[in-house]
Image (cartoon, rainbow, N blue to C red):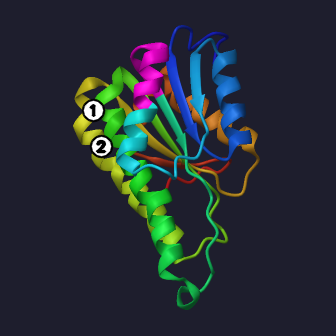
Amino acid sequence: MQPASLNGKRVLVSGGPPALCTRIAQGLIDEGAQVTSDMRARHDAAPTQSAEDLFGSATQQLGAIDIFVYLLTPVDEPRRIADLTLEQYDSIVRERVKTPFFLLQQAAKHVSEQGRIVLVLPANDSAGAASAGADAAVRTFARVLTREVGARGITVNVVSSGRTESSDVISLVLFLISEEGRWINGQTLVASETAVA
C-alpha cells in the first residue's frame, strides 16, 4: 500500500494476544489511521454487554468506526474430546463463539459505509474439537453477515494465522482493509499461504 493509505480512517482493534494486537494497531497508525485499541479481558460481563461497552467507548473516542479488527484469543483445551470438561467447553464457547458473535452484531450497527470488518483466528494446529468447531462457527458468522452489510459496501473477512510469523498476519489484515481489498468479501484467508479456506 502507499504511505498514509488509511489516512483519516477510524479503526477499532481489540482481542488478543496483546503483542499481536499492538503490532497490528501500530501498522494501522503507520498507514495514517486513527486507532483505538482495547485488549482488556472482560470476563466479568456478559458477552452482549462487553460488545456494547467496547463499541460505545470506541465511538466516544473516534466517532463512527470505519474498520473493526478483532483477534480471537487462543484457548487451552485437551486434544481428546473424552478429556474435555463441561467447564472448559463452556469457557471456549464463551470466548470463541459468543464473544465474536456479539461483537459482529455491534460491528454491523456501528461500522460506517464502505467499512471493513476483519476477524483473526489463532493458529489451530494443536486445537481440540471445541476450538475447531468454534472457528467454523466464526467463519459462518462472517459469511452470513456479508449478506446483511454488503449493500452498505462493508466487507467481512477472516484471517487464519496458520503456521506463520505475525508479520504475515499483519500484512494480510492491512491488505484486506485497504482499497485493494474491497473485492474480497466473506472469505477466510490463510496467512502466508495461497489457500482460501
Q: Nearer the viewer, residue 60 or 8?
A: 60
Where residue 129 appears, x then y in whole percent? Answer: 52, 76
Q: Is residue 30 magenta?
A: no
Q: Main secondary structure of the magenta part?
A: helix
Q: Say left or right for 28 vs 116.
A: right
Q: Residues within 10 Å of mark 1 (few under 14, many from 20)?
A: some
Pointer 2 residue: 145
Work out whether residue 125 can be spotted: yes
Q: Nearer the viewer, residue 126 or 41?
A: 41
Q: Amino acid at mark 1?
A: Gly
Q: Residues within 10 Å of mark 2 (few under 14, many from 20)?
A: many
Give the magenta range: 55-67
Quarter placement of the N terminus: top right
Between disc 1 and disc 2, the foreground one is 2
Q: In the displayed structure, would residue 58 be above or below residue 51?
A: above
Q: Say left or right for 100 vs 165.
A: left
Q: Earlier in the sequence, mark 1 or mark 2?
A: 2
3D distance between C-alphas at marks 1 and 2: 8 Å
Pointer 1 residue: 150
Where residue 42 appears, x then y in whole percent? Answer: 52, 46
Q: Residue at x 23, y 28 (%)?
A: 151
Q: Residue at x 63, y 9 (%)?
A: 4
Element under label 2? helix
Q: Nearer the viewer, residue 110 or 4?
A: 110
